[in-house]
Amino acid sequence: MVTIAWTNGAVRFLDQTELPAREVYIETRDPLVVADAIRALRVRGAPAIGIAAAYAACLSVWGNPTGELPALRARLGSALQELQSTRPTAVNLFHALDRIRTAASSALTSSDLRSVLLAEARAIHEEDIDACRKMAVHGAALLPGPSGVLTHCNAGALATGGEGTALGVIVEAHRRGKVTRVFVDETRPLLQGARLTAWELMAQHVPVILIPDNTAGVVMQRGEVQAVFVGADRIAAKEPPEEGCGISCS
């Protein structure tokens, strides 16, 4: 499932707001169209946002083959500023744009600028594909045998450059015969679980049961869930408390 790609000087992405009723792909050579797509959640998910922004930055210098380097740098700067404003809380967005900015600083000619930006954007994309694959392999190994699995929101291919983070683990575990069925919370209020995760799992031929958010506790109480996989933008580690403080940590 390829939800975002660089294609012959254009960015092509799946419009997530149209799912699950229609699969609509948008192809553009305008970085502002990508920026608006991020704002409108046509492209969503932290890794996917970073990848889309990196490719959009490339578009800002790609459509002007005869442009002088100072003018292209100015166009790039404007695009970076616009892209930064799309999702202020998206850490991957700023990380990707910082990498693009650093790559651009090494360019000595207009041709160099286009080459280094596209190489960096592709590297960001490939690194995410690799990270998703490794996460799927390691995560699938955690399940001891056939299990019912619960997930929330959407952390699959739609949210990343690869097969997904939490959902990628579930799909890989299903390939190994370790997942009997997946309970998907609807995810209020935007219904990412109902509209996106359920659609992804059905496309991968994974047995899926869509449930209201407040039903998750019931299916766990009944023993129908042996594992829960969810995505998280960031994980914070905390130093263990001092010995004898009376706080129990697990």
Image (cartoon, rainbow, N blue to C red):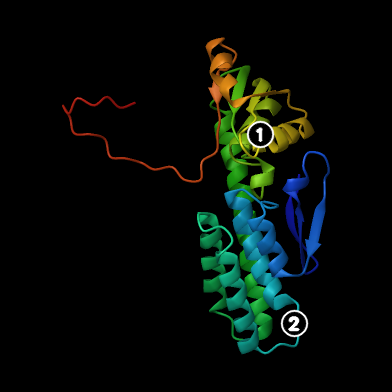
Residue 125 seen from this side: yes
**Which residue occupies 56% across, 64% down?**
85
Q: Mark 1 points at which residue?
A: 193
Q: Residue furthest top?
A: 222
Q: In this view, does 233 lie above or below 98?
A: above
Q: Which of the two labelled residues, at mark 1 and mark 2, occupies the earlier sequence position?
A: 2
Residue 122 seen from this side: no
- Measured as percent of width and height from the top left, residue 90 is found at 53, 54
**Which residue occupies 72% across, 36% down?**
195
Q: How many marks?
A: 2
Does residue 16 appear left or right of residue 222 in this picture?
Answer: right
Which of the two marks, 1 or 2, is nearer to us in this view? 1
Q: In this view, does 108 lie above or below 227?
A: below
Quarter that holds the N terminus: top right
**Which residue occupies 65% across, 83% down?**
72
Q: Quadrant of residue 56?
A: bottom right
Q: In which quarter of the image is residue 10?
A: bottom right
Q: Give how far apart the Cα atoms at labels 1 and 2 are.
A: 41 Å
* Residue type at tag 1: Gly
The reply to whether dot 1 and dot 2 touch (C-beta < 8 Å) is no
Q: In this view, does 205 lie above or below 88?
A: above
**In-front residue for pair 166/84:** 84
- Measured as percent of width and height from the top left, residue 212 is found at 63, 24
Q: Mark 2 points at which residue?
A: 64
